[in-house]
Image: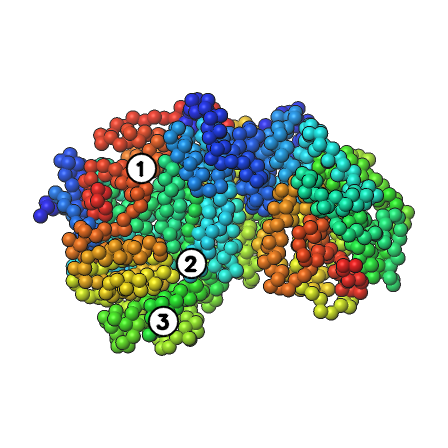
Amino acid sequence: MRMPTPDAKIISKRSIIVERLQQIVPRGAFGENVIIDSAGLSAYECDGLSAYRQLPLVVVLPETTEQVSKILKYCNETGVKVVARGAGTSLSGGALPLADAVMLGLGKFNQILNIDYANRAVVTQSGVTNLSISEAVSAADFYYAPDPSSQIVCSIGGNVAENSGGVHCLKYGLTTNNLLGLEIVLMNGDIIKLGGKHLDSEGYDLLGIMTGSEGLLGVITEVTLRILKKPETARAMLIGFDDAALAGDCVAAIIGSGIIPSGMEMMDKLAIKATEEFVHAGYPSNIETLLIVELDGPLDEVTDLIARVQNIVNGLGSGYIRVSESETEREKFWAGRKAAFPAIGRITPDYYCVDGTIPRARLPEVLMRISKMSQKYKLRVANVFHAGDGNLHPLIMYDANKLGELERAEEFGTEILILCVEVGGVLTGEHGVGVEKRDLMEKVFTEEDLKQQQRLKCAFDPNGLLNPGKVFPTLHRCAELGRVHIHHGQTPFPDIPRF
Amino acid sequence: MNKSLIPHTKKEVLDIIRATINDKASIEIIGAGSKRGWGRPYQTSELLDLSKLSTVTLYEPQELVMTADAGTRMEDVRQILAENHQHLAFEPPDLSLLYGGSKNTGTLGGTVAANLSGPRRIQSGAARDYCLGFVAISGRGEEFKSGGRVVKNVTGFDLSKLLSGSFGTLAAMVSVTIKVLPSPEKTRTALVFGLDDKMGIQALSETLQGPFEVNAAAHLPAGIAKNSSIARINTQGQSVTAVRLQGPAISVEKRCQGVKALWQCYEGFEELHSHNSDGLWSEIRDIGSLLNNQSNQIWRISVPPSEGADLVAKIRSDIQCKTFFDWGGGLIWLATDGKLEGVGTIIRSALRLAGGHATLLRGSSELRLTSDVFQPQEPALYRLTKSVKDNFDPGRVLNPGRMYEGI
Amino acid sequence: MKTNFTADQRSNPLMAMMEENLRKCVHCGFCLPSCPTYSVSGDERESPRGRIYLIKDMLEREGAPNKEIVTHIDSCLSCLACMSACPSGVNYQHYIDYARHYVENHHQRRGFERFMRMLLVYTITHAKVFKIALKVAKLAKPFSRFFGLKISNMISMAPTKLKTAEITNEARIYPAEGIRIKRVGLLMGCAQNVLRPSVNEATIRLLTRMGMEVVVSDGVGCCGALSHHIGKNDIARDSAKTNIDAWLKEFDQRGLDNIIINAAGCGTEVKDYAYMFKDDPAYKGKAQKISDLTRDISELISEHQLPTVKLSNQPNIIYHDACSLIHGQGIRLEPREHLKSAGFEVVEIPGRHFCCGSAGSYNLLQPTMANELKDRRLALIGEVSDSNKVSILATGNIGCLMQFASGTDLQVVHTVELLDWATGGLKPPY
């Protein structure tokens, strides 16, 4: 992985930068809010994509939006890069530090500010975890719909930056469909409020643009979300198949019949085995592929839909159907799925989680080709994915301490993603481009396409200081992009040693 | 009158825009031209008419996806979808009556460019939430695409959102990919009569906080309800508070009973079944027939739902107007004398405390020139908006000034 | 996780084991929200995932650890909530214990700090010395504001009233009522029997009523947890060996069906003796045997039956999970079930479970964080106590008991005291 060459001039000014940051964010009750020692920095050296690591120049943990604004304004004026970080759970290296960049941690933005049932909205600071929002409104039978598997830890600001999905987005949408408002700070220090408890934006949909912008456009400090009433009933079905292709057919048949389940997930044998050891969700062990289908709504509707799905499944000849009989059992079914990634950590020292989306109908074919690749690269792969919306998460198992295995795992991952694009899908469904898929962007987009995206970047951050080196394979200077006659020259990233 | 250019291919659109840039001229983009009255009045040298780009190029019902040229008529889209028991869940309105055009004239591109949505907005979102990808020509004369044909996609910035609601000021879309959904099996509407604005919105709020999966919630004061074409609504001489329930028959039945139980405290509970129900909600969606005086100026105000009634009361203390509420109180349609000046200032000063924004949806060109059509922006937000425009259309070639002066 | 241990480092079996443990961490962060110190500070270094990185850095580099690393290792409560949260199976308990031991051997603490730590372990684990210290502390109470936070916190933790124990740590046999169904050894605990002798008294009354002969064996003393958690492994091992020998002697001579522990912190430690000695050929088997025999009092009750409930109109109570029970030993439901069977209405504390800040000697060594955690916990308890007319807070560990008692008007009791009361024993406070 190539990252932009660290700017030696900035690194040499480190002590001045630190001093200024310490003025802006003084020591708090529980220690320094500006971290400078190498051990302390090492705690911030990577996010959920731990194969890539880099010590940041300095870490700062502001407590207020005003402090964020002052930090960004100072950095903008002095040409210092900034990388924002929520809970550090990105699976694409979105929060990978840079050697010459300030890491701006939002861990202290951990308060829910306002719960408003009349307007069905929650206002929260950006470092609050996804799950704690649902927990805070749970007593009134409300919840926040997007539920990425890491919801217990991932921050809502990070969810917005990555446009996180989750197992229930098939019916209830992604972050972008459940977001009402934001407070953001631009690189020049401007604090901007977008949206609120009302719908639609005034002017351009900058709320929509911020969502999924991977920390390149602005720093999110406050979020207003739509909350939903919990469905009267939700029941999950475990459906087992001896053949992955049949499971694919089942998914297509359910959607084709006009049913939109609230979640439809698929796991293969290896994934079932690993999660079962941690969660004991009661998954069957003697099948090839497991579908988890959840239906929610009024009791009679759910009963009716379960019967319809059962008919479809019977028609396909599956030998295993189990329907959750209680809320505890339903949660158990999901607990397995949600812990699936880290649970793979029990059967392999390291894994590489791939994230591509394909049209649903191509599922069986893609699965077969992944299995062939697994033989070719001599690496095991466990498949866990959101079958309902064609979002694949093959987990490639490797050992980072064995020479060459990481590289082989990456090549394998790349081949899967290229296959996704080839069948009409995309590089990333919900984990983001980050550094991980950055160099594959040209497989999907033309140079012209990418230029438009970078122009948006220029509108928000003309000096290119926010989270550089992510998302875009080549850097164009805004001045160059701004010229009406465009030159086609590229500034590739010079090499730095990989980790 | 400006020169009308009617391209038949994407290449022709590209050539036209490039030529316009070279000529340092400007261009107004239209599909069917059904919403030309929406926005600030502006002059361009040319008119880019995309109505001949009208092919549905991909429709896979099982994949819930459709790709069509920007000029594809909404009527055609609806019809193709209906044949497969599918629909556009964001319920785009037909604003033709409002602007005095003929019925069902809008296009897919226009629907996305204006980010339309209907009563189901509260549950299912707007055009922005369904636009999966597009191909467009920017104000720099560059062809580009964004997004794709799958729902879950975070590959690069979500430019579909940028173009949704940008009124053609950044790029001319030539093709759009949208997510489609199965049509609901059954529809029913629950009604109560005679509530004032505040109580009506309160009743809507209660149902929206309940487990009924209400997907539309409106309150029509008596003066608006009488304009409805549905006999059960227009003969009451009272206000109407309505929620819509859709889904499998058995479920709709049960939920409707639930709403009835909740609304026991109000008088005159009634139900509308499929035909009348659809009729009522298309009137609420399309606005025109409910606010039928063609000489009125019409405002669209988006607020936090709990603020709706108070906001209207406050505005009423300053101006005479007709109003009704959609989105559980969060969307206010306001009609008043077309000649009256300063309405925008009154509405917007009332909005300052409540939060939200107001758009002058219809008004004379003088009015649209003197009032801000779109909500004025704070300085920092305006700078950012201008910066976005600078990057996509530095020469102010596309729909210049339609949204904001200089943008 | 990728590690960079040298072949030389790996040749040390303990280090090799730490590496193996480390490599299970996939940096998913599921542990973060479970960690009390991270929830307060929002600082990655104050989280299990952060600490794992800091410790890895320390172990890979060898030599004296940097001061910041020590700070963040010291600030860990060892509440082990992260272990319950970890899907990848990282054994944080053994990892942090090893790190503390490493710090103890490679880091020179400031004179005062070092002295405090020595004094603390010595005092608390020696009943007679501890009693004298508490008396001194009591006298010093009016002057506590003249001392630094640590000292003043120590003074404020000391109870104003100290009851003399009717039951001492000396070897003794308490015969079963009726037919004897079991013979169990009781760990009296070092601090507990000084601070709150009624816990052991209630335990003995309850168990003998259940038909068990309770024996306090000669030589059994401190379990070693306190020393262990501040990195003084040698002292901890010595304590453990003394206890193992004493109990095995009892086992061989007169038989012992179980070892019963009513201080959850001690229970976690004794159950971990097996791990502590797994590379010690002389003690491996013995330690395993003792760990296997060990039960928390609530587990033992679950294996048998609570005596007939004699009380009526039992008050509503709030139950707080001691970390060493819920995370250290995975015991959550048992105490609640017993309290319910004994007729108490158990009111749950809202929100997620968090440590009260006591954590062995933590509240004495890390007073700022400990007080913050106590206040947060008490604020949540306050949300439900009045509305449910609760005046009693029950918990299963002496540390939590003392921690809460120093900050609330609720009566704070040990679960076993309530169970004894409901089944014919004395009503707390005694």
Graded by Cα atoms within 10 Å as few (under 14), some (14 to 19) or many (20 or more), the crowding at tag 2 reads many
Q: Gap in Å between the C-alphas at discs 1 and 3?
A: 47 Å
Horizontal and vertical percent position of residue A21: 47, 32
Taking the view exactly as shown, the residue that stands out farthest to the right is C253
Give me the chain letter of mark 3.
Answer: B
Horizontal and vertical percent position of residue B7: 16, 44
**Residue A120, numbered label:** 2
Horizontal and vertical percent position of residue C59: 63, 29
Q: Is residue B4 above or below residue A1?
A: below
Locate the C terminus of chain C and report the quarter of the image it occupies. Answer: bottom right
**Residue B373, numbered label:** none
Amino acid at dot 1: Ala
Name the residue that disc number 1 marks. A459
Pointer 1 or 2: first along the chain: 2
Question: SS for tag 3?
Answer: strand
Name the residue that disc number 3 marks. B190
Q: Is residue C376 visible?
A: yes
Colour scheme employed for the rendering of this structure: rainbow
Residue C214 lies left or right of residue B92; in this view the side is right
Question: SS for tag 1?
Answer: helix
Amino acid at dot 3: Ala
Residue drawn at x 69%, y 37% as measured from the top left: C97
On the same chain: label 1 and label 3? no
Give me the chain letter of mark 1.
Answer: A
Amino acid at dot 2: Arg
Locate the N terminus of chain C and report the quarter of the image it occupies. Answer: top right
